[in-house]
Image: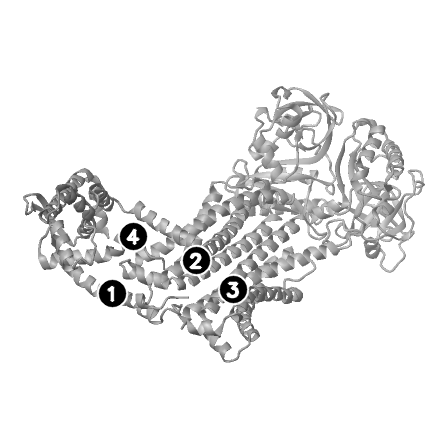
Amino acid sequence: MAPDPKRSEVLQGTLDLLVLKTLETMGPLHGYGIARRIEQLSEDVLQLNEGTVYTSLLRLQQQGWISSTWGTSENNRKAKFYSITRTGRKQLVEETDNWERIAGVVGRVIKLAPQR
Amino acid sequence: MLRKLLSRIHATFQSDRLDAESGAEIETHLALLEERFERQGMSREDAHRAAERQLGKFTRVKENLREQRSLPLLETIWQDVSYALRQLRASPAFSITAILTLALGIGANTAIFSVVKAVLLNPLPYHEPERLVMVWERNLHRGWPHNIVSAANFRDWREHNHVFAAMAIFQTRAFSLSDGTGDPAEVNAEQVSPNLFSVLGVKPFIGRDFLPEEGKPGSARVAIVGNALWRGRYGSDPRLVGRQISLDEQSYTVIGIMPATFADAYVAHGLLNAQLWTSGLDLSNQDRTDHGFIVMARLKPGVSIQQAQTEMDVVSTRIQREDPNDFGWTTLVLGMHDDIVVETRPALIILLTAVTLVLLIACVNLANLLLARGARRVREAALRTALGASRCRLVRQLLTESSLLSVLGAGLGLLLAGAAAKALATFAPADAVGLANAGLNPTVLEYTLGLAVLTTLLFGLLPALGLSRPDLNKALKEGGRNTSESPGAQTFRSVLVSAEFALSLALLIGAVLMVRTIASLREINPGFNPDRLLTMEIFLDSPRYAPAGSHVHFFKQLLDRIQSLPGVQYASVSRGIPLEGWSGNGFVTAENPRPAFSEMPDANAVMVGARYFRTMGIPLLAGRGFTDADRESTLPVAIVNQELARESWPGQNPLGKRLKMYGNFPWLTVIGVSGNVRTQGLNVGFFPEIYMPYEQYSSWGQRPFNLVIRTSGKPLSVLPAVRRAVAELEAHLPISNVRTMDQVTNETMSLKDFLTMLLASFAGLALVLAAIGIYGVMAYSVAQRTQEIGVRMALGAKPKDVIGSVIRRGVGLACAGSIVGLTAALALTRFLSAQLYGVTPTDAFTFAVAPLIVMVVAVLATYIPAHRAAQIDPIIALRCE
């Protein structure tokens, strides 16, 4: 298979999962906070283009898995705070199962001997 | 899904507000990042740059968000399409094969459909054409199923029927047209009843239609000119209306000009090739046996053809009772359109079926190619699923690829079809009427589009569904070597290949049967020798040839001149030529001078000149030929053909016997017996014929005669000299219908030739597709079995064993297909039987040879992968493990 050139697309499924999980554990957060949390947890392994967090948030919102309200940030700026919804929690359980299954598979695929 | 869509639709209408919001959100994020970097000790500028690097360019992020909010359709379709394009570019061999396969399949279908549309589906361009019928006479006792009509019967029909709103009648004839503008020309014309055009529901577009009183005997002579003649000879001058033209040296007033649309339709539908319509139709003949007219009628509203037929049966039964001369003559009412396409419809239906089979094969082939490709893409599908692609999305992606192939194939196919339709119209036999109108039009384009969609579903859906449900664990457990299709899938692909062979074989059998038909037709001895034989028509219709015997004088002089031209071996004259039809006349013999009408035999009476038999190469089996000594004043003589002699005087010597044409004719003495000639067509049997010396019928001058000229070199090379010879005797005498007898022979087979050529091309196409199909399957299976073959070779299998095993498998597939194909062909060729000659629909030779051809193709197509298998290096093959 040809490697997919779009990094963001490769991460598409994963980033949504990370964002959802972050919101579940941390409670309501704004985009900056989510980016910091992921950065912290990934121990700088994941080079995150933080703009994609917003695309992910928008996607999740369109699915109805998160909701948002306007609030004020640490530096007194206007910021949108996101929180996970009930369907979002349900989805998170499913997505987590799915991810674990797939991660195993992908791991095996990647370890396969190259084809002639 | 729905929720997402609604939210996006909502967003689309609020895009400005949302844009501003997300802008604010991102600005906050950017500011927070900058502050953080500044806290870490960066300068303001560095912090800004670093923040932007980490977040992405402000505008870019906003842009992404806007895209994400907006409606997804176009965007993701474009994503799918561009991804599909990349996929197709990545494997050009596959893509080109697929697109060409589709282009050929769809192109051929579109071309044939455009013909079917033009000939069978387009209604006739007349007013309420479904109410138009042709009314023929028929005499099944005598074997005339579809005969022209006698004036006397027409008059009775018109008077006694209650089913027709109107009946029109006409007679075809040629006129010599002269009008002071250029050379006289011979034009095909129809003398018509005044209501002909109103029955059809058309009118002249300049001038007026015929008036009812112009049908009465003795009324002023008037003519309506066809559009082509008007444009060609009169330069589209509308002042032609009102002018006098001379037809056969009689003056006619032009009263109208027909529109171009009418001319085309009228000619295209093969009713007749008329360029001119005139009054002066003579319907006074009381003799019911003199059949010479064509009748068309318009049904009253609500009357069916069947009802009209029933009514006409009653009318004709009454006429038969009243006039014994009419014994056995009934009527045949046919819808005008049915009547026109009676010959072409079956041929076109056969072609449409054949070409549909080709498309089916193309689809099967593509499904197969996609399946093989799909097997190679299992891992791709697995990864995409793993990365979050839904099944729906995968199916859509794969269907996008198929659609893209279809669209490209259909596009290319349309180009091919456009060219093919033109070629078809050119090659089309003259009797495949309406073909000239074939072409691409909206209906045809819709048909093509429909085909493209259908083919996409046929060849794309199955592989897509299969691929979109990869059994991840299994697919991946099988490891890198055999990310293979399951045995089930392999079997399925084998079945598909076999199906291709089955369909191809059925087509091939049809084509071979037609080729053998043509071969049998070509082997038929027409009873004369068509080589180097030229024929043309001359019509001495000017009043100067009204005096009895004047035409004899003319032809004698003309033949003397032609005979002495270099390159001419023999020349003669006759009324009518073989293969061009047969006009039956009743006759009686001296042995049975007053038979019942129902038992009176028919013969084709042909007036011929001296040396006719020698010129035509018709053998004289007994007695003598005609000579210049057979004149009006000498004993009326006749030469009969073998068939007549056999029927009338079985087992006796016909020489010296006497016979007489029914009607006011003299008794004739038989002086010779000629070989039988095919008068009705190559594949039609022999009919009795009576030849009479034209010189003994001096009042028969003003009728069309044929010159027949046997040449020593190319027949057409003597034509200029012949024309000069004619002009020397009679300046401005038109010569028409110049053809070689080879041409005449070929014309009789043109529809069959056409059918054969197309069927053979379709069968060839089908075989190529099947070959591609089996090649694909075998190549794939060899690639799959690399290890196995390697092991075998390591254990001592020889290359030829390997080749053998691969070919055996290929031939096995072809064999399985062939068995099915043979069975299908046995069922299908029945529908071809009407087109066949000299072979039965279950011809053993064909059913033996066609599978052989298929096998050879299978072996050839399998050989390359087999050879490749034999080249496998066991060491490498095993190391790959």
- Which amino acid type is marked by label 4? Lys
- Which amino acid type is marked by label 3? Ile
Asked whether the residues under marks 1 and 3 belong to the same chain, the reply is no
Evaluate whether residue B518 shows in this view.
yes
Residue A103 badge = 1
**Gap in angstroms between the C-alphas marked 2 and 3:** 16 Å
Residue A3 or residue B696, whichever sits in front: A3
Residue B856 picture location, percent across and down: 60, 65
Left or right: B112 in relation to B467: right
- Which amino acid type is marked by label 2? Phe
Instruction: Name the secondary structure under disc 2.
Output: helix
Nearest to the eye among marks 4 and 3: give it: 4
Asked whether the residues under marks 2 and 4 belong to the same chain, the reply is no
Q: Chain of mark 4?
A: A
**In the rendered image, which residue does mark 3 sit on?**
B774
**Gap in angstroms between the C-alphas marked 1 and 3:** 39 Å
Q: Chain of mark 1?
A: A
Nearest to the eye among marks 2 and 1: give it: 1
Instruction: Name the secondary structure under disc 1.
Output: helix
Nearest to the eye among marks 2 and 4: give it: 4
Instruction: Name the secondary structure under disc 4.
Output: loop
Residue B678 or residue B771, whichever sits in front: B771
Q: Chain of mark 3?
A: B
Q: Are marks 2 and 1 in contact (CB under 8 Å)?
A: no
**In the rendered image, which residue does mark 2 sit on?**
B459
Which residue is located at x 32 percent, y 63 percent? B382
Q: Which picture quadrant has residue B563?
A: top right
**In the rendered image, which residue does mark 4 sit on?**
A6
**Gap in angstroms between the C-alphas marked 2 and 4:** 30 Å
Q: Chain of mark 2?
A: B
Residue B559 picture location, percent across and down: 87, 37
